[in-house]
Amino acid sequence: MLDTVIFDMDGLLIDSEPLWQKAGMDTLQLYGATITIEQYYGTTGLRTPEWIEYWFNYFSIDNTHKEEAVSTIEHKAIEYIRQDAIAFPGTHYIINFFREHGFKIGLATSSPLRLVDVVAEKLGIAHLLDAIASAEYLPFGKPHPQVYINCAAALNASPLNCVCFEDSFNGMIAAKAARMKCVAVPVPGQFKEAKWGAADLCLDSLLNFNDELLKKL
């Protein structure tokens, strides 16, 4: 029986992906590289070091600059998000929905914990989260399931009793690999793509989740 919900953060609860995108693309341009929006979406959900490694290899950029580039992206993203990011419609609704249903509530993210603190304060949700797990220092980030497994452990929950909400393909794969139910809420332009068929449910907004859908999970 489902009794625990675990949320991704960036691109799901807060509209931060355009700001991560800006930070990443701005940083790549410092090294003479430019990517398209479509290319960016293909690497959504990766941790910053893995994101940089992927694109540095793609463009054959000197790897001695990787650490500097990671630091630049994270600094830019945190400042952009602190200043400009807003909650997605349904963010407070979905957290309160599960709180009212007696679920334990966790957050599992690829982002650094210092950004989690910024977002939790900005959205006013810190007191509603029972556990937070970051893949920042794990050996592997999403699509590896470890961050979800760790979050479930921190919540004293069985993965089989967890439902996760994700906006990225890499995150969905991580949740399913952890043997959890997954509700995908992709960006509008990707909603109809066949790849979301691996999710247990696909929605175009958090606001559309309800009691009937919860029962079907």
Image (cartoon, rainbow, N blue to C red):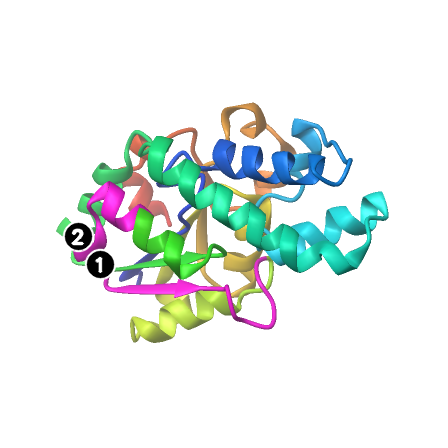
- Placement of 146 over or under 96, stated as above or below: below
Please name the residue that numbered disc 2 is placed on: 99
Q: Is residue 177 left or right of residue 33?
A: left
The kind of residue on which mark 2 rests is Arg
Q: SS of the residue at dot 2?
A: helix
- Position of residue 13 measured from the top left corner of the image (x, y, whole percent): 35, 41
Q: Which mark is residue 103?
A: 1
Position in image of residue 30 (x %, y %)? 70, 38
Residue 38 in picture, x, y percent from top left: 68, 29
User: In the rendered structure, are the residues bearing label 2 and label 1 in contact, judged by CB atoms less than 8 Å apart?
Assistant: yes
**Residue 194 picture quarter:** top right
Question: How many numbered marks are there?
Answer: 2
Dot label at residue 199: none
Q: Nearer the viewer, residue 2 or 99?
A: 99
Image quadrant assignment for residue 140: bottom right
Query: Residue 148: image x %, image y %?
Result: 45, 64
Task: Estimate the spatial distance between the alpha carbons at disc 2 and disc 1, rounded to whole Å.
Answer: 6 Å
Do we see residue 124 in this rendering?
yes
Q: Quadrant of the N terminus?
A: bottom left
Asked if the stretch drawn in magenta spans residue 147, the answer is no
Task: Indicate left or right for 84 with 193 as reference.
Answer: left
* Crowd around label 1: few <14 · some 14–19 · many ≥20 (10 Å): some
User: Furthest-left residue in view?
Assistant: 100
Which range is magenta? Answer: 119-142
Dot 1: element: loop
Specify the amino acid type for callout 1. Phe
Q: Nearer the viewer, residue 207 or 144?
A: 144
Q: Is residue 163 visible?
A: no
Residue at (41% x, 41% y) in the render: 79
